[in-house]
Amino acid sequence: MKKIIYRSLILAAFMFAFVSCKKDPELPVVAQNPNRYVNDWIYENMSIYYFWNDKIPEDPDYVVEPDAFFNSLINKYDATQNPDGDRFSWIQESYVDLLNSLSGVSPYDIGFEYVRIQLQGTEQYYLLVLYPKVGSDAQAKGIKKGQFITQINGSDITKDNISELVGGTGTKTLSIIDWVLDDLSNEYKLKPVGDVEVMMHKDFAEIPVYLDSVYTTPNNQKVGYLVYNFFARDDGDGSLSYDKLLMKRLENIKSKGATEFILDLRYNSGGAVSSATALASSLVKNRTTSTLFNVVQYNELVHSELEKEYGTNFNKTYFEENILDKDDNVVVAIPNLGIDRIYILVSNWTASASELIINGLKPHMDVVLIGQTTVGKNVGSISLYEKNDPKNKWGMQPIIAKYFNSNHQSDFTAGFEPDHKVNEFDPDQLRLVDFGNIEDKMLNKALTLINGGPLEPTPQRIPRVSSNTGLQGINPSDVMLDRPQRNIVIDDEKADLIRDIMKRTR
């Protein structure tokens, strides 16, 4: 018996040794998901703030890159199936770049705004200058509205190299053609006018208040005119410098006795609600601070929390008499022009805060639109980012709100139709002139309506514009305004309140 036990012990020991010496099976390697951290942040915030948070997929793919993940959560727009869907939310890898862009600050800027126009039968583009930016080297070097850039640094411009040619640092040599009057044929023709070297700008801050003028028509009407290219309070430094400048220009127009007013928003695709409210407050007829400008609708979660904190009127904005700083101190008074009607110049790129102005003023005064159908954006966004998180530098700008006027109207997703159609970019008459020049087709139309007839006697020989240019018409998708940061309503008035309250509810 002892031998049997002893042998059993030896066998067990041998088997234990054999098993112990046998190599452990390799466990499968679980791949790390480098995107999970940021994607979790995206999902959590979209579930709270996004206007259509009830339509976010329950089980998205967390493995994909953050921008693809963000887009997978969007309630996508479809002209026929989902016309009220989202066309405007976006995300960027750098929240710093996102915030700068909202204030008109470009990391690298060539100094003028432009649209691309393709040459017929080729892959080559010309850049049509819409305006030189105030304070840019391009403005100082004489680049002007209506000129065509045919080459940059000796290279033809194509869709493949345009980003490289208009970006970067150093200097750029621009080859330019312009409209020149041929006295023999009495016709404007495109001709080379030489090369111009311009300096690129780093972190360039564009000033949105572009031009103000007052005209006296033949029937002795005083007409104010303001070109305003985007809504921003300042360049991000908290100084409210742009709002102050806007009020100064409006006060200047008022002091000159203007009784009619033309607001040029043709290239204005949106921006800060606070600046839009200030501008609307200067224009509205019979202004009082108890008169309603707009009403905001959020998703059910955000709406209920804000209502609990601030009461039932939290989402109503009234016309204002003063611009206030963050501590509610008066910075500058808002002049009221005391006008009965307003003429607004619009285009296919007029959007968001510009449309907020149009929609918000319509119940209170006559609003006459001149130009082309607007974009149709009745929603607003806020910036979401983590300032002190080294693992997450992303920033997103999701739609969180929908805007209504005092009559609870918000039915302009197809855009506002103009009362008087004028196509600035008619391919047969593609000669643009400087802002404020009464030969400008859109401005001239407004002044003619105000005057009740032509501004001056018709000359015997009106110069024609040559249509033999070889240029195609402008595709609205091929423009500077396809950049999302120029196509927004930023809910800057309530953004901090919303973020603070919703963080407390998590």
Image (cartoon, helix red, strand yellow):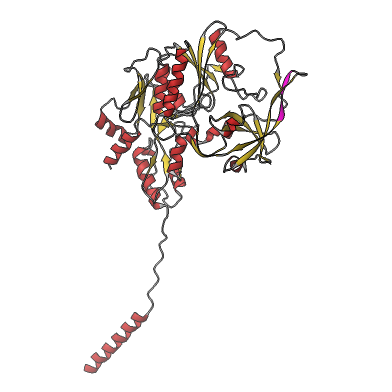
Say which residue appears at 66% left-offset and 30% top-offset.
472
- Image quadrant in which you'd find residue 441: top right
Instruction: Examine the rendered structure and indicate whether residue 12 appears above or below residue 371.
Output: below
In the rendered image, the quadrant that contains the C terminus is top left
- Which is more toward the observer, 12 or 333? 333
Does the rendering let one see residue 90?
no
> Which contiguous range is marked in magenta?
186-192
Is residue 25 shown left or right of residue 146?
Answer: left
Instruction: Give the dominant element type of the magenta stretch: helix, strand or loop.
Output: strand
- Which is more toward the observer, 105 or 290? 105
Is residue 374 shown left or right of residue 3?
Answer: right
Say which residue appears at 41% left-offset and 37% top-offset.
398
Instruction: Examine the rendered structure and indicate whether residue 306 appears above or below residue 343.
Output: below
Where residue 413 appears, as percent x and y from the top left, is 46, 27
Where residue 63 appears, as percent x and y from the top left, is 43, 52
Does the rendering let one see residue 234?
yes
Residue ranking furthest to the front: 140
Instruction: Examine the rendered structure and indicate whether residue 432 appears above or below residue 253.
Output: below
Is 58 within the magenta? Answer: no
Say which residue appears at 34% left-offset and 15% top-offset.
288
Is residue 436 shown left or right of residue 66?
Answer: right
Where residue 488 appears, as percent x and y from the top left, is 45, 32
In the rendered image, the quadrant that contains the N terminus is bottom left
Is residue 201 shown left or right of residue 61?
Answer: right
- Which is more toward the observer, 294 or 105? 105
- Image quadrant in which you'd find residue 250: top left
> Number of labelled discs?
0
Where residue 490 appears, as percent x and y from the top left, is 41, 32
Residue ranking furthest to the right: 184
Is 190 within the magenta? Answer: yes
- Which is more toward the observer, 155 or 423? 155
Residue ranking furthest to the top: 219
